Image: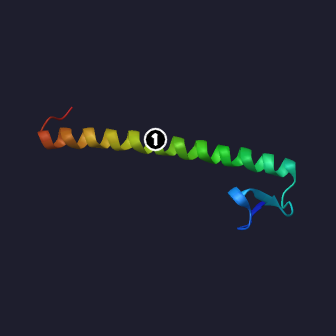
């Protein structure tokens, strides 16, 4: 865990103590990457769903039904 002290020039991190081991940090990074990927896929699915619903509503409003 990096702690930033205001007395440092350039805000260099000062390591005071580690909360996680190196292995735990790697696992946490992988978990965060998976969460990022999941949310990206979720956003894409939502965008696709909105596009489909918009097309459907436009067809209804224009009177063209298939």
The C terminus is located in which quarter?
Answer: top left
Q: Within 10 Å of the Cα at label 1, are there few (<14), some (14-19), or many (20+) other Cα atoms?
A: few
**What is the quadrant of residue 55 in the picture?**
top left
Asked if one can make out residue 1 in the rendered structure from this viewpoint, the answer is: no
**What is the quadrant of residue 9 in the picture?**
bottom right
Residue 48 in the image, given as x and y percentages of width and height? 39, 39
Q: Which residue is mark 1?
A: 45
The N terminus is located in which quarter?
Answer: bottom right
Local secondary structure at mark 1: helix
**What is the quadrant of residue 11 in the picture?**
bottom right
Q: Residue furthest bottom?
A: 6
Q: How is the image coloured?
A: rainbow
Residue 24 in the image, given as x and y percentages of width and height? 83, 51
Residue 2 in the image, given as x and y percentages of width and height? 77, 59
Q: Residue furthest front?
A: 9
Q: Nearer the viewer, residue 62 or 47?
A: 47
Asked if one can make out residue 5 in the rendered structure from this viewpoint, the answer is: yes
Identify which residue is drawn at 51% across, 45% down.
Answer: 42
When the figure is inspected, residue 5 is found, relative to residue 25, above or below; the finding is below
Identify which residue is drawn at 63% across, 48% down.
Answer: 35
Residue 23 in the image, given as x and y percentages of width and height? 86, 47
């Amino acid at each position: 865990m990096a702690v930033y002290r205001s007395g440092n020039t350039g805000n260099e991190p000062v390591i005071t103590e580690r909360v996680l081991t190196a292995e735990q940090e790697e696992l946490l990074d992988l978990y965060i990457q998976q969460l990022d990927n999941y949310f990206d896929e979720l956003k894409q699915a939502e965008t696709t769903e909105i596009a489909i619903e918009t097309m459907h509503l436009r067809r209804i409003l224009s009177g063209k039904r298939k």
